[in-house]
Every structure is written in C-alpha cells, then in structure tokens.
Amino acid sequence: MIEPSEQLARLRQRIAEVHEKVAAKYPPKAQAPRQETASNETGARWFAEEWSRGEVVRNEFGEHFQTERLFPPHKRHGSVYVSALTELPADLFSTFAEIDIPAAPAERWAFLDTETTGLMGSPGIYAFLIGVGRITREGFRIRQFFVREYLEERSVLAALASHLRDFDLLLTYNGKTYDQPLLEARYQLADQKSPFARLAHLDLLHSSRRLWKLRLKSCRLSELEEQILGVYREGDLPGELIPYVYFEYLRSHEAQRVASIFHHNAIDILTLACLTAIVPAAFQASGAEELARLGIRRGEELLGIARWLLTAGRLERAVELFRSAVGAGLPDGLLFRTLWDIALLEKKLGRKAAAVEVLRELGGCQNRYQALALEELAKHYERQEKDVALALEFTQAAIAAGGSPALARRKARLEKKLSKTQALHEDHDPDFRLRTSQRKHL
C-alpha cells in the first residue's frame, strides 16, 4: 500500500509536469512591480496578468478578475472550423429538443461551463471560474470570470448575471444537472437574483448520448472531443486535479498555477460549441450523404439517430436510418434488435411484404428475436394470407425456438381450425389431402 506522503508527492509531480507544459506554451510577460494597497495588504487580492490578457473588474459587490479569449474564424478545432459556427441557423434547435426552444440568432447563444472547488453536494462548494462562450463575426469569444478569493464570489455572480442579459439561449454539457443548479444555489446564498429563469436551456449531454452511446463506452466531453472532433490535448490539466490546483493557488497566490485551469475551461467551451455544430444537424439531416459530411458514418451512430427519430414519431425517416445502420454494419447484439425494429415499423407503416421479408430473415437463424419473428409470421399467414397450414408451421417453429407458453394455445387452435378446413375440403375434393401433403413436402 502506498503511503499518503508518497501519494501526495506523486500528485504534486503530476501537476508540476502540467504546469511546465502550460508555461512553455504560454510564456509569461514581463511582470509589473507588485503594488500593495490598503485593500491588498496580504496580497490575497493581487492577481498577476503576465500570462493572460485580463483585467480586474469592479462592481457594486467588489472586484474580481476577468479575461477574454478569441478563437478567430480560421481556427480549426479538430474537424470543425470556428467559421462554421457563424453559419448556424437561428432555428437550429426547432425540431431537435424535447423542450420548446425559440429561434434565436447564434450571437444570442451562451455556451457556459464552470470549474468548481469540488463535486456537487460537497459542503461549501462554489464555482471559482465561470466561462461563457459566444459566437461573433470576429470568431468564437470566451469571457472568463475568476474568483481570486472567496470574498470575490458575489462580484463574479453579479458580473455573470449582467453578461447573460445579452443572450436568449444557454447551452451546456451536463449543465442541467450540475452547473445551473450549483450557480442558482450560489445566487440564493449571495441574495442575488439568478439570471437563468429567462433563458431557455439546452443540455447537449442527453442528445450526444443518444447519438454516440452505442459506439463509445463513455460520452464524457473529453471523450467526444477525441473520438468525434479528433482533438487530442497535450499537457491538459485533468479535471479531477482542478480543485487541488486552485487550492494551491489560494495558498501561494501564484497566478501561473491556475493558467492551466483557464486553458482547460476555454477548450471545454470551444468543444461544446463545435459539438453544437454537429449534433442537432445530425438529427435533422435528410440523408446519408448529409450525415457523412458531418462525420456520421458508423452503423451505431445511424442507429442512435434512428431510435431518436422513432421516439419523436418520425417513422418513415426512422426506418430509413435503421436500414442504413444495418448496411453500414452492426455487431450481432445490435443487428438483430435493429432488424426486429425494422419489421415492426414496416408493419406499422402498412408495408406488409417488407415486414415479412425481414421477419423471415430473423426467423431463419438463431437469435433472441427468432421466436418473436416466427410468431409474427404465424399471425401474418393466418390473418392476412388465410393460410392456416403455413401459420401452423411457423407456430411450431416458434415453439421449437423457445417461444412463449401462449403459443401452445395458438398451436392447438390452429390444428383444430386446420382439421375442420381439411375435413370440409375433403368432402368436396377427395384429392385435397394429397395436394396439401405434396405442397408441404415441397
């Protein structure tokens, strides 16, 4: 078992390595002489700006540090150019989310992410860094509000509320569960009005899971950043270390210690914005070619969209994508379930021949839907084709495949019905039994 002192030493070494990489990427400017003031006697309020273009902002609740960062249009974040964000339509989310999201120009969307002192539910937790991204003609601009010490939280909250007045829609990743409830609690404790009541809120986590959970083991933002956008961060500070680094900053008041947190937060927000250019468009795409342009080609991804369309009642488009997913390739566990969904959808849409074709495919090999498919075929041939003999054959096959106990009653009823039919025909046609036997043999 590793001693606590050794664990702490390893943790400090890991953080030091991150700091070295960040410092190499963002070399410090010449530092201005440190000024001591009456409100800065211990230096706790001093915040160096040698590594960041920022300023100390004052309002009625005090002061805090604030910085902005611009990603220009030619900047590429993996597979998405920043310039693509400015082309997103105002009604991008009109048929995308379960909630009603009014149309608003992209310049009125706020992409928000927080860095906190611990996990939700921990005592005394607060957001010490809040980043808000916005789409502008100049590119993607991120403003970050930083609490240099706890007394500055009220100033940050007031500044954030004022900034959010410029927006109509809030976009987050797991923000409905984490960021917004936490911030609302902090506004309540600070006796300030929360800015979120007037904002529509779209949490991209849920739709991202629908799209990629069948392909990826995890739908964490960092996982999507790598697997979907193709971005691999070098020297990034792991999220679980962020509270520790911030507490180290509070102890030492060395500004460069939190440079890596600012960078981590900004890239998270940029990733959120780039995923917003993909996820809603994927659910609204009109065909495979349009999906391919978005980078959506895998069978599991197509299947995720198809299932969402099914729940939304868009049956024609759903069955089309179910078939596309099968064509793109699926593991057996997903393949047979998808074929079953296709069969039921074709039946619901009144395309009986197409449904029977898929059901025969399912019934012809061993899988978890084989018995169900054979039972459906039995129903079809009895009710639609009026072929009792063939319906009985499929019922017997379903029983052999491990079907439900109710099939035994169906079998008995069909045998009785077939016996009556045969007796009736034999009374009028002595060769009927022979022809029936020959057809069955064939």
Image (cartoon, rainbow, N blue to C red):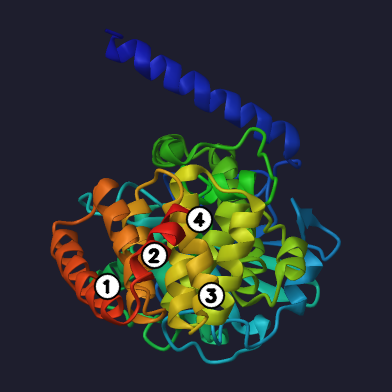
Residue under label 3: 353
Real-space CA distance between mark 4 and mark 2, rounded to the nearest whole angstrom: 25 Å
How far from the left and from the top, in percent, is residue 323? 60, 64
- Between 32 and 92, the residue placed more toward the observer is 92
Q: Left or right of 263: which side holds 343?
A: left
Residue under label 2: 436
- Between 249 and 349, the residue placed more toward the observer is 349
Residue 347 vertical placement versus 440 (above, below): below
Residue 191, label in figure = none
**In this rendering, the label closer to the viewer, 4 or 1:** 1
Residue under label 4: 361
Residue at x 56% of width, y 81% of height: 316
Quarter holding the N terminus is top left
Residue under label 1: 422
Q: Secondary structure at mark 2?
A: helix
**Tag 4: amino acid:** Glu
Real-space CA distance between mark 1 and mark 2, rounded to the nearest whole angstrom: 9 Å
Q: Earlier in the sequence, mark 1 or mark 2?
A: 1
Q: Secondary structure at mark 1?
A: helix
Q: Earlier in the sequence, mark 4 or mark 1?
A: 4
Tell me if label 4 and label 2 are in contact, CB under 8 Å.
no
Residue at x 25% of width, y 74% of height: 188
Residue 258 vertical placement versus 440 (above, below): above
Residue at x 75% of width, y 42% of height: 29
